[in-house]
Image: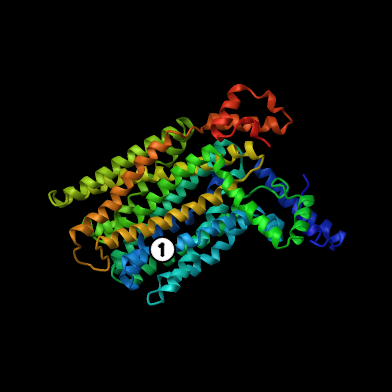
Amino acid sequence: MKSQSPRNQSASGGSSDQQSNNNRGVDRGRTADSRRKAHSKITFGDALGFAIGDTYGGGSGILTGTYLSVFWTRFCGFDIGTAQSIIGAAAMLSACSAIFFGVLSERFYLFRLGRRFGRRRFFVMILSPLVLVTLLMWVPGMPKVLYFLVYVLYVTLQQMFGVCYSSLPGEMTRDFAGRSLLSTVRMFVSGMSGVLIPILATAMLTWLGEWHAYSYQAFVTIITVMFAIVTFASSRLTWELTPEEAGFGDDELTRRRAARHRRGPREIVQALGRVIAEYTSTFHIATFRVHITLYLICLTLMDIFTQSFVYFVVFDLGKTAAFASMLLSFAVIAEFFKPLWGWLFVHIGPRNLYALDYTGALIGLGLLFVSWRLEPVLPGGVWTACVIASSIVWFVFRSLAGTVPWLVFPFIPDVDMIVTRRNRASIFSGITTFLRFIFSGLASMGVGAFLAFSGFEPDKSGAQTPMAVNAVAFVCLGWLAIGFIAAFIVSRRFTLDQRSDLIVLKEIERLKAGGSKADVEPHVRETVERLTGVPYERCWR
């Protein structure tokens, strides 16, 4: 198994043969080890090494979504409309970085840093020191523009991580069970991160007092340092396709570098056009269209809930931010269901799992609504038990809503590959992250505008108007219920499962081996056309 480093020859071809041979030997060992891992069975230790990185992926959104707007409105002089507008505008402004990182990571083997550290893992690694800079947005008294810029950096790092990290399972193994194990453990770790944050917040806010800025700063600093540690560790404990496997052998590397040096303004414009076409072509795949619709609905709903739940507890249920954090900490129970979700994903398929998820989520939201309406009439202890039980039901199915799309995602590039003959995992990850943050930004701005219009003033510790109280409840519960009903309807069109994915993979292997498209079996043709939405004759071209 030979692998050659770009250090074997410089872009101008001026390196010495002896140095070339030395570097070839160094990279051969690294590539051979990566290739051995790529074709071995994924162990739980491998999955855990990958999954710890999503402590950041799962926790970073919870941290800012739950507490940043509260912090800004209490300690930094923001009203709810301004705070949510900054959060939303920053998310939308930085969304284009997902496209940039998708293209860059796809081609990062052109550079020595990519050959040395990996085209995906390099970006996971450099996130570690950069995330510490974002602690500035938890410092009161700064100009609003500085809060905006630091938050832009924060969400840009989220997108860099999301694009590069999410591409790794598809490169670490092609085995269905191995990918499912990677995704299941990842979702468990991600969910536990989302639980740890409210637990720590509850402790700090109860101990130090929730009307002091340093109470928030204490747990935010601890969690951000943890993010820095786990992302660096994950970058060292994972692997990806080698340059040769990704189509960046020495011959291709030389050709691409030469082409890059010849580019003028016209060629750059044409290259940008190809990038746009590359991303828009993902929507030609029927399975991806359904997947991205469900993903955007569910993740946007999670954002809305995260941003409004503390307000709902404080102003509708009449409790404290510490009580809200205590309720959120019960989401830990949902994490023990993650192995069950992974098992059900394999045995009943994504389509049925989506139906279970959305039905259960609607039940959980209904129970929270009933708990709210019964608060004035039930004894305190009984009501507290009811709201905790209602929250647990909701959290269990909320965790499933966030899990299924990521269990599905590693198999989307398989469907695309039979059309394009390429593994475009980072392209799909890039467009997914781009749209995710566009919709997240719109949701944040929508929440802020709606609540501001209703007269909601979260910087006041006293009572709100009835209109404002009902508006908070409608955002936190009503908007989510409407969204899950829509998701249930869309999910009926999703047909990718283990059996159909295996059919696609076998057909890819047959065509790679030189098989004729004219010899395709009828049930294979039907499966490929149903999943891709593309006539079979236009596949594998």
Looking at the rendered image, the quarter that the N terminus falls into is: top right
Could you tell me if residue 534 is visible in this image? Answer: yes
Percent x, y of residue 514: 74, 30
Q: Position of residue 476 (x, y in %)?
A: 30, 52
Q: Residue at x 29, y 43 (%)?
A: 364
Q: Residue at x 53, y 48 (%)?
A: 48
Assess disc 1: are there few (<14), some (14-19) or many (≥20) residues with their C-alpha within 10 Å of its C-alpha.
many
Kind of residue sitting beneath label 1 = Ile
Q: Is residue 247 above or below residue 69?
A: above
| Residue situated in front as seen by the camera: 104 or 128 | 104
Q: Secondary structure at mark 1?
A: helix
Q: Quadrant of residue 417?
A: top right
Q: Residue at x 64, y 34 (%)?
A: 538
Is residue 68 shown above or below 396?
below
Left or right? Give the position of 369 relative to 339: left
In the figure, residue 208 lies in which quadrant? bottom left
Please tell me which residue lies in front, 101 or 357.
101
Name the residue tied to disc 1: 87
The percent position of residue 310, horizontal first and vertical second, equals 30, 58
Image quarter of the C terminus? top right
Quarter assignment of residue 160: bottom right
